[in-house]
Amino acid sequence: MSKKVKLAIVGVGNCASSLIQGIYYYQNKGVEELKGLMFPDVGGYRPSDIEVVCAWDIDARKVGKDVAEAIFSAPNCTTIFYKEVPSLGVKVRKGKVLDGCAGHMKDFPEEKSFVISEEKEDELEDVVAHLKETGAEVLISYVPVGSEEAARFYAEACLRAGVAYVNAMPTFIVSDPEWGARFEKEGIPAVGDDIKSQLGATILHRALVQLFVDRGIPIKRTYQLNFGGNTDFLNMLERGRLATKKISKTEAVSSLIPYDIGWENIHIGPSDWVPWLKDKKIAYIRIEGEHFGGVPMSVEVKLEVEDSPNSAGSAIDAIRCAKLARERGIGGPLLSISAYTMKHPPKQFPDHMARRMVIEFIEGKRER
């Protein structure tokens, strides 16, 4: 059994930065020091067992650099909680641009936006070959929201290279029956779609909705408004890129409500970009309902969190579960870890149930 989880990363942005910093932050810590993790151990794999073996990006300030340097390059702006990441000996390759860069990004300062590298792009056969050459076992896709073509490009590469796929973005691939069937036919594990942060707006909103449902309080209307200052929020200023994102975030919440409250009574989605917030995300959540006797009540919550480490807290588990499935010869969409760490999994489950399913999967009591 390999003692490492050989990881490929597409998109060396803030989320990748937090993930890689975390791998080394936890490296020399004992079991009792593994704080801030949902699952310190996944089938014998700790966070520090993850080894980045290849990476792709399209930004000129990252392409050609060692990954350890690229994660701290502009426009990345997330908190640096472990700056001593050693040189990995892995150069960032130029990915296929496709629809990975929204047109409006060029209207903003370079330090806040993307600068497309002039290096030659890797074509599909190049990506497949490099995945095989480096022995990559799991690929995590961090392409920007709305990059439908780019997301499918790397999913296809995983199918051809036999690499497990983790789709952290809201392009519906793992939850799409046709794509899911392809991964199952090839015996390749897949986790997705759209990463659900460790304790973010979606999981908090779901917990509040579940509380209303469990306590017999009919929900009349609800909203979730999010804004932040990273490139993800800047990218999402182009509303045309938000179709699947809005569906993903809305279904993550509405799937727990056992009745229809009407489309006009639920609003969930990114609201704006505030540059000085950098990687900080602020979410406002409101739920209105009626308790005993039909008397109105409401709950309002404000969440403030560093966005990318919050994402990494879930990615670290999705990656290790994908490796575990690969090791056990399990292919296709992984229902348990997808339901627990993704907003738009192939099948939704209440979070307490999804957590139990993940524990059973790790223990070998559940196949997927």
Image (cartoon, rainbow, N blue to C red):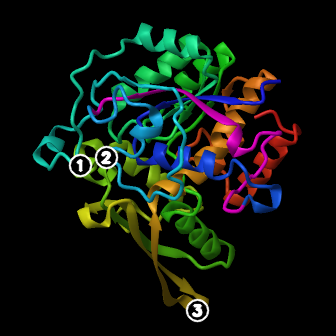
From mark 3 to mark 2, how far is it between C-alphas? 39 Å
Q: Earlier in the sequence, mark 3 or mark 2?
A: 2
From mark 1 to mark 2, how far is it between C-alphas? 5 Å
Q: Amino acid at mark 2?
A: Leu
Does the segment drawn in magenta span residue 53? yes
Instruction: State if disc 2 and disc 3 touch (CB < 8 Å).
Output: no
Give the residue pinned by disc 2.
242
Q: Amino acid at mark 1?
A: Arg
Is residue 367 visible in the rendered image? The answer is yes
Instruction: State if disc 2 and disc 1 touch (CB < 8 Å).
Output: yes
Q: Residue at x 13, y 41 (%)?
A: 106
From mark 1 to mark 3, how far is it between C-alphas? 41 Å
**Residue 36 at what x, y percent from top left?**
66, 62
Q: Earlier in the sequence, mark 1 or mark 3?
A: 1
**Residue 337 at what x, y percent from top left?**
68, 43
Give the residue pinned by disc 1.
239
Q: Is residue 132 left or right of residue 270?
A: right
Q: Which mark is residue 185?
A: none
User: Front-most of 236 and 68?
Assistant: 68
Give the residue pinned by disc 3.
293
Q: Which residues are magenta?
A: 35-59
Disc 1: CA contacts within 10 A as few (<14), some (14-19) or many (>=20): few
Q: Residue at x 14, y 49 (%)?
A: 108
Q: Give the position of the C terminus as an image quadrant.
A: top right
